[in-house]
Image (cartoon, rainbow, N blue to C red):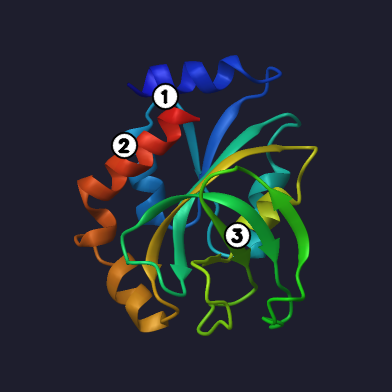
Amino acid sequence: MATVIAASLCSCNNGGKLVILAAEEAEYNRCREIFPEIECIRTGVGAGNVIKACCTLPKGTRIINIGYAGSNNIEIGTVSLVSDSFRYTDGNYKFDDHANPLHLSDEGLPCYTGNSFFTESDRTEPTLYDMELNYIASFSPHLELVAAVKIVSDNLSVDAFLNNAMRESGVLTSDEVWEKVREIVEKL
């Protein structure tokens, strides 16, 4: 199945290599398992790690970002395509003040990228929060961000994230969750 995925995604590009970027080791390992025909790169968490990883990729590389994200009110284990990506900097989490907006898809949920773990939000709409996506997006047009798929790991709680994402078994590592990731990527 992974060969079909890679072939269909690569057939609609301008010749750029397709890679999956994942920050955490658990995400990276599952991506390698589910998509053996697509190169997977573990970036590490946060802006500095993502920037370092993206700088090593050749111009025209096509990227799918797959990883965990917090949410204000979405059930843990939910898998979603990202519709729009926004960046918040220097601890400024006022949601009417954002930078670097990027529309990725007509489906999915918005994702806000910050420099630290989000523990509160004044947004009431279902929203995702991460620490990498918008930094990946900022490499456009050098790199092409094809899509982002996020798995809700917590509801703005560091303790819940550590309890859910860092365990080798549980909702975030379940075959059911990662099957949903595969299904979304297949549709791209």
Residue at which label 2 appears = 33
Measure how far apart labels 1 and 2 are at the Cα level: 10 Å
* C-beta proximity under 8 Å, tags 3 and 1: no
Measure how far apart labels 2 and 3 are at the Cα level: 22 Å
Q: In this rendering, which labeled residue sits more in front, label 2 or label 3?
A: 3
Q: Position of residue 142 (x, y in %)?
A: 79, 37
Q: In this rendering, which labeled residue sits more in front, label 3 or label 1?
A: 3
Q: In which quadrant of the rendered view does residue 14 lie?
A: top right
* C-beta proximity under 8 Å, tags 2 and 3: no
Q: Position of residue 121 (x, y in %)?
A: 56, 82
Residue at which label 1 appears = 37
Task: Give amino acid for label 2.
Answer: Glu
Residue 122 is left or right of residue 134, and the answer is left
Say which element carries label 1: loop
Instruction: Note whether 60 is above or below 166 in the view shown.
Output: above
Residue in the image at 64% along x and 53% along y:
84
Task: Give amino acid for label 1.
Answer: Glu
Residue 139 is left or right of residue 79, and the answer is right
Task: Give amino acid for label 3.
Answer: Glu
Residue at which label 3 appears = 132
Say which element carries label 2: helix
Mark count: 3
